[in-house]
Image (cartoon, grey):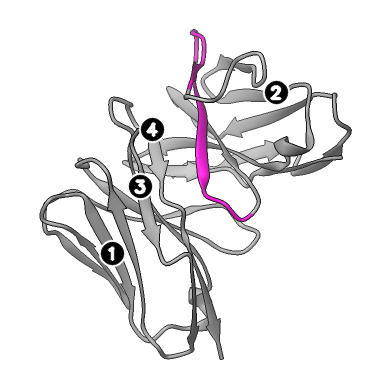
Amino acid sequence: SAVISQKPSRDICQRGTSLTIQCQVDSQVTMMFWYRQQPGQSLTLIATANQGSEATYESGFVIDKFPISRPNLTFSTLTVSNMSPEDSSIYLCSVVGNVRQFFGPGTRLTVL
Amino acid sequence: GQQVMQIPQYQHVQEGEDFTTYCNSSTTLSNIQWYKQRPGGHPVFLIQLVKSGEVKKQKRLTFQFGEAKKNSSLHITATQTTDVGTYFCAGPISGGYNKLIFGAGTRLAVHP
């Protein structure tokens, strides 16, 4: 199993600002994933973060809005840029281990 | 594009009643996974089904994978208050290694 921590756990931000979310895993992993879960909704994959290469973004998500860093095999950051109220969501990172995905506790973001 | 549909969206049951959620994919899946998210929590892996027609049981939970590998179901027998949460099915994104597309989820409320 993998133990994942995220910082911050929650934040309230003003529109137009940016927030960087950190994800730390207790073991080395090749791929880390970032998901968004809008209030009362399902999870949507934002991007895959690979160490040593640029992140791969899913349709509807762009690097300018959600820049991702992956400096090593246990850590990644997701930045939500130029935020608007529509960005209010829970952002979760995850890793794969033994078939299953392990999720971090999530970062609950509210944009005013 | 690829879709995973899940019904019902909500289900309210009396404790002791049975519960079933259904998942249907627009494409044939190599496998399907089920996750449970407790209120305020993050998704937790329950099970993966791989084979056509596969049925797996975990105590009161029964998971099925359809013969065509496009649909799946989760049945809970004699629900308990600890079963409260949202149940998600998820399938691999076509062409994406370890990437998942999630169904909309079924939110289960159990009344004592």
Mark toward the viewer: 2 or 3: 3
Q: Dots 3 and 4: beta carbons under 8 Å?
A: no
Question: Observer-nearest residue: A4 or B67?
Answer: B67
Q: Mark 2: few, some, or many residues within 10 Å (few <14, many ≥20)?
A: some
Residue at the image position 16 percent from the left and 57 percent from the top: B66
**Magenta segment includes A54:** yes
Q: Are marks 2 and 3 in contact (CB under 8 Å)?
A: no
Reading the chain from its start, which is encountered first: label 1 or label 4?
1
Expressed as whole percent of the image width and height from the top left, the position of residue B73 reads 28, 64
| Cα separation between marks 2 and 4 | 20 Å
Q: Nearer the viewer, mark 3 or mark 4?
A: 3
Task: Give the residue at mark 4.
Answer: B99
Q: Nearer the viewer, mark 1 or mark 4?
A: 1
Name the amino acid type tagged 4.
Answer: Lys
Which label belongs to residue A79?
A: 2
In the image, what residue type sits under mark 3? Val
Measure how far apart labels 2 and 3 are at the Cα level.
28 Å
- The reply to whether dot 1 and dot 3 touch (C-beta < 8 Å) is no
Q: Which residue is mark 3?
A: B4
Badge 3 marks a residue whose secondary structure is: strand
Q: Is residue A112 magenta?
A: no
Task: Say whether mark 3 and mark 1 are on the same chain.
Answer: yes
The amino acid at mark 1 is: Ser
- The image quarter containing residue A31 is top left
Disc on the earlier residue, 3 or 4: 3
Residue bounds of the magenta highlight: A40-57
Quarter of the image where one finds residue A85: top right
What SS does tag 1 mark? strand
Q: Is residue A28 visible?
A: no
Nearer-the-camera pick, B26 or A31: B26
In three-dimensional space, the C-alpha distance between marks 1 and 4, rounded to whole angstroms, equals 21 Å
